[in-house]
Image (spheres, rainbow, N blue to C red):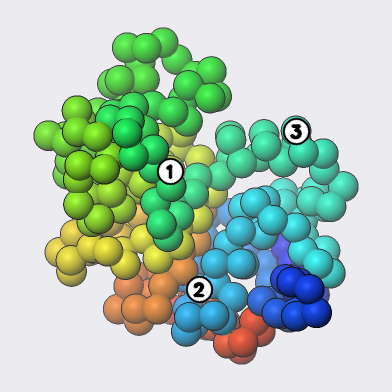
């Protein structure tokens, strides 16, 4: 499903350069459950952004389902992001003045999926799955950081994407809530969804079946559990 060939990513600002990824070689098969581990600044978020077609490599080649991303148009990339990939961003990216329910409906609205009643039912179903049905009518800026994290996860899953990318998905959750979210990810993976998360928490990483270790933008270890 995913193949990176010597992928590098360099960010430039004036005379300064930061190498976020350095010649990463990596393949991910459909249906895998993978965690990406490494300290802050190791390149975890950058790798997820490239895999999710949110950013392009500075060098190397990236193939998504056999197609080289460099050759895809912006419309084709948008189609991949909208229909095949679900994102859980580290800083949530919710619309603060919209209700929780409306935030969950947005991917369906943008994708032209279902009627208004269908979207409400789908959004409420996801809120039950993450344990927040009572927060449906609250604005996103009226709930806690941990609750916003759960809403962000629910929004990423509402389209049932083929690939779920989650950047520190349990970082703002207590241990019990984190375990519940990982159990949900495992259930979705067992149903066929490819799940890739980034984390600095070894206990969370051990829920997955493969751990990729990054350090200073380089892949230093790839282990199967």
Q: Is residue 184 visible?
A: no
User: Which is more N-terminal, label 3 or label 2?
Assistant: 2
- Residue visible at 12% across and 34% down in the picture: 134
Answer few, some or many: residues within 10 Å of disc 3's Cα (few below 14, many 20 plus, some between 14 and 19): few
Answer few, some or many: residues within 10 Å of disc 2's Cα (few below 14, many 20 plus, some between 14 and 19): many
Q: CA distance from mark 2 to mark 3?
A: 28 Å
Q: Which residue is mark 2?
A: 36
Q: Which residue is mark 1?
A: 156
Q: Is residue 125 above or below residue 145?
A: above
Q: Position of residue 189 (x, y in %)?
A: 42, 53
Residue 41 falls in image quadrant = bottom right
Label 1's element?
A: helix
Relative to residue 104, is residue 146 drawn left or right?
left
- Of labels 2 and 3, the one closer to you: 3
Q: Is residue 223 above or below residue 156?
A: below
Q: Position of residue 96 (x, y in %)?
A: 34, 39
Residue 222 falls in image quadrant = bottom right
Q: Is residue 45 above or below residue 215?
A: above
Label 3's element?
A: helix
The quarter of the image holding the C terminus is: bottom left
**Mark 1 touches mark 3? (CB < 8 Å):** no
Q: Which residue is mark 3?
A: 75
- Residue visible at 37% across and 12% down in the picture: 116
- Residue visible at 75% across and 80% down in the picture: 16
Q: CA distance from mark 1 to mark 3?
A: 20 Å
Q: CA distance from mark 2 to mark 1?
A: 18 Å
Q: Is residue 73 above or below residue 181?
A: above
Q: Position of residue 97 (x, y in %)?
A: 32, 33
- Residue at far front of view: 14
């Amino acid at each position: 499903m995913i193949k990176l060939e010597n992928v590098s990513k360099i960010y430039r600002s004036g005379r300064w350069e930061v190498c976020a990824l350095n010649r990463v070689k990596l393949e991910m098969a459909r249906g895998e459950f993978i965690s990406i581990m490494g300290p802050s600044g190791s390149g975890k978020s950058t790798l997820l952004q490239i895999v999710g077609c949110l950013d392009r490599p500075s060098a190397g080649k990236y193939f998504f389902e056999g197609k080289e991303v460099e050759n895809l148009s912006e419309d084709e990339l948008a189609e991949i992001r909208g229909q095949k990939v679900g994102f859980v961003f580290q800083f949530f990216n919710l619309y603060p003045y919209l209700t929780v329910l409306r935030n969950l409906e947005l991917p369906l609205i943008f994708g032209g999926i279902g009627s208004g009643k269908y979207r409400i039912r789908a959004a409420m179903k996801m809120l039950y799955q993450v344990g927040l049905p009572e927060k449906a009518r609250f604005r996103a800026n009226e709930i806690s950081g941990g609750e916003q994290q759960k809403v962000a996860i629910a929004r990423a899953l509402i389209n049932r994407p083929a690939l779920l990318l989650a950047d520190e998905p349990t970082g703002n959750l207590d241990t019990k809530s984190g375990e519940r979210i990982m159990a949900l990810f495992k259930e979705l993976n067992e149903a066929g969804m490819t799940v890739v998360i980034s984390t600095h928490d070894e206990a969370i990483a051990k829920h997955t079946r493969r751990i990729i270790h990054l350090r200073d933008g380089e892949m230093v270890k790839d282990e199967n559990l």
